[in-house]
Image (cartoon, helix red, strand yellow):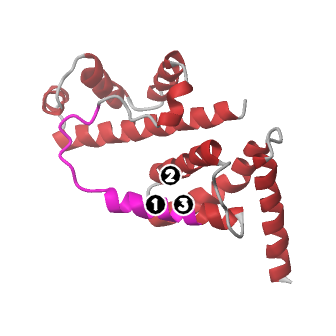
Amino acid sequence: MQDRRAKMDTNRENILWNNFRGGQPNSFRILFDHFYPSLCEYAFQILKDKMDAEDIVLDLFIFVWKNSDRINIGKSIRSYLFISVKNRALNRLRSVRPQIMEDVFDVPVLDSALEDIDIRDISAVISAALETVSYRAQSIWKMKREEGKTNIQIAEELSISEKTVEADVTRIRKLLHLIIKRNFILTLFL
């Protein structure tokens, strides 16, 4: 009975995939909504970081959107997506190295898939995202981006450690990167 149910689920999921590849309206959204939560959970089990997990999954869906005509899913779209998330998560873990973060607050790295988004849209998204962080993090952003101060200068001015500045900077970069990607995914549905 369990095998039969799994086979029916796989068939339904493969139908979702085929509908998307066939250009059926809203099919990508349905595919995304169906798999996104479980893929994020799976990536989180590997990475132990919610933002990194969501980032990996969003990257995968952007890749799927752009390359659906060239993707060979094999047995099932479920297997393809979960194996892809696992590989991307393991690659992320391999690439993480302790780094000296002298000036990590350059413009957030944007995926090439995001080139079509209007810069005013990105600015509005960034402004809204910054309103969700603490006053201290907003101050650090302003000092880093608008005043061009170094982490050491910011730490001295705010009477906090340089490591605290680096941690806030890293957190904000991750937040902005994730929010910009989410915004891009949502524009795909319009």
User: How far apart are the two marked residues, 3 and 1, measured between alpha carbons?
Assistant: 6 Å
**Picture residue at 28% right of the left edge, 17% below the top:** 146
The residue nearer to you, when weighing 182 against 84, is 84
Range of magenta residues: 83-105
User: How far apart are the two marked residues, 2 and 1, measured between alpha carbons?
Assistant: 7 Å
Q: Is residue 16 above or below residue 125?
A: below
Residue under pointer 2: 56
**Picture residue at 44% right of the left edge, 27% below the top:** 130
Question: Amino acid under label 2?
Answer: Ile
**Mark 3 and 1 residues: CB-CB less than 8 Å, in contact?**
yes
Count every numbered label the image shows and give the total: 3
**Mark 3 and 2 residues: CB-CB less than 8 Å, in contact?**
yes
Q: Is residue 120 visible?
A: yes
Quadrant that contains the C terminus: top right
Q: Secondary structure at mark 2?
A: helix
As drawn, is 111 to the left or to the right of 106?
A: right
Residue 65, how many percent across, how many down? 64, 43
Residue under pointer 1: 89
Q: Is residue 115 above or below residue 33?
A: above
Q: Residues within 10 Å of mark 3 (few under 14, many from 20)?
A: many
Residue under pointer 3: 85
User: How far apart are the two marked residues, 3 and 2, measured between alpha carbons?
Assistant: 7 Å
